[in-house]
Image (cartoon, rainbow, N blue to C red):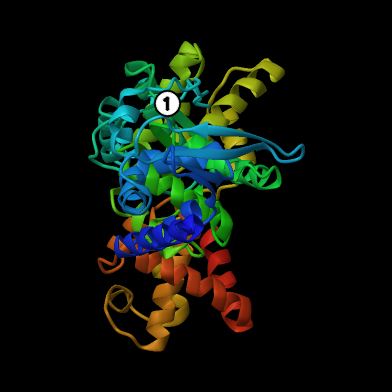
Amino acid sequence: MTDYRNLWDRALANIRQSLTDMDKGEEYEKWFQPLKFESFDKQEERLIIAVPSAAYSEYIENNYLRLMGSALIPLFGKKLRMGYHITVDQQNNQSVIQEQGQEMVTARRNAQQKTPQLPEVDPQLDMTLNFRNYIEGESNKLSRSVGLHIAEHPKSTKFNPMFVYGASGVGKTHLINAIGVRAKELYPNLRVLYVSARIFQQQYTTAVQQNSVNDFIAFYQTLDMLIVDDIQEWAAVASTQNTFFHIFDFLFRHAKRILLVSDRSPAQLRGMHERLITRFACGVTIEIEKPNTQLCADILRSKIRRDGLGTAIPEDVIQYVAQTVRGSVRDLEGVINSLMVYSIVDSADIDLKLAEKIVRRLINISDEPVTLDYIVDTVCEYTNVTHQDINGKSRKKDIVLARQTVMYLAQKMTNLPATRIGRLIGGRDHSTVIHSCKKMEKALQKDEELRQLVNTIKKSLEQPK
């Protein structure tokens, strides 16, 4: 008597070996190992497999039907039919048989002829954050251009995935919302979803608690464009990263759009799986730098027009705010909103005096913005090194420390992005600046003498010139 369970085990072993050869061993653990042999009717040549949920059968049919056929047909027969025993209510022990009603050798062709209707998905986009009010400047010209291309050509594999990073408030969230909004305008049936990393993690946790992880994954795999904000929040959260890896891989292999946003570059994502980092960096990676004064002024004028403020805010106030509140679009808009509130409450015109009052309250700036040159001058004065030492390549301990102090204070006290700081300090790249700042932060926690020195330099820089 034939032991069909043993034949099933042999077929699984062949599938596992094939996936291992394709460097997809993890796919076997996730999607094939939970499958269980249930029965085989030799007369009808029908194989029934027990699966945890419909997501399993759907995923395998969409991705590995040919592999299943090549492993099963030699053992079970050329006219093999396959069905699934799916538990749909584990508490009440209810189940259903979902049978594939055609021979495995024709299943792929017939399956492709069926186009199951998917329910609509709420894209969760902020429709007010679009390209019409995303003001272009030197700091975001490249990201805006790439973003428009993606929105207008969502089925293209160019620039996929798109990884955008930069400091808080530089317009990253506005950009990715604008991409999603534009894509939906052009292609209304496109399945687009914006989700923050935190919400994704909460959804995953709920799915684990409700024993519905496979349905959670299956939903995300139906998307045409997935936008994830603040992915640095997944650092050291291994289970969430592992689940997202499978979603990412599926979407990427099926030429679906993936947009990722972080406050740091892929190389700086400590606590993130290496396999995710390599995938994040395989498309296009773009840093959005802090806006310069001209772009800040343009952003302010755009907001004033959108809010219908007309001439309520004079040009000298716009210039003052743009020059003083540099680096954060969020802060710029906050200042304008506060100016309007204070003007209404105090029944006063918006002028330079009111603007100075609001800016000092909200932004906590010194009388005159600190420049990188001023930081270098001050550090050199306190550490007895020269400008040539700071910009040079010397690895002497005291010079390296002074150089790292300049980078650390420049990041803390100016609106310059890491890219610009590195360029101005001996032509170094942004990763050197970030690494130096992190070393300084660790050293300041342990070295009291160094902490006192840096605080003294900082206080000196904050004093009026």
The residue lying at 34 percent from left, 35 percent from top is 103
409 relative position to 362: left or right: left
Task: State whether residue 8 appears in this view.
Answer: yes
The residue lying at 36 percent from left, 54 percent from top is 75
Where, by quadrant of the figure, is residue 53 drawn? Answer: top right
Task: State whether residue 170 appears in this view.
Answer: no
The residue that mark 1 highlights is 191
277 relative position to 349: left or right: left
Nearest the eye: 32 or 197: 32
Q: Taking 230 as reference, is 114 above or below it? A: above
Q: Residues within 10 Å of mark 1 (few under 14, many from 20)?
A: many
> In the image, residue 413 lies at what x, y percent?
49, 57
Q: Taking 442 as reference, is 244 above or below it? A: above
Nearest the eye: 49 or 199: 49
> In the image, residue 297 lies at what x, y percent?
39, 30
Q: Secondary structure at mark 1?
A: loop
201 relative position to 190: left or right: right
The furthest residue to the right: 92
Q: Taking 34 as reference, is 250 above or below it? A: above
The residue lying at 49 percent from left, 49 percent from top is 244
> In the image, residue 95 lies at what x, y percent?
65, 35
Looking at the rendered structure, the kind of residue marked 1 is Arg
Nearest the eye: 155 or 438: 155
145 relative position to 246: left or right: left
The furthest residue to the bottom: 396
> In the image, residue 338 lies at what x, y percent?
62, 27
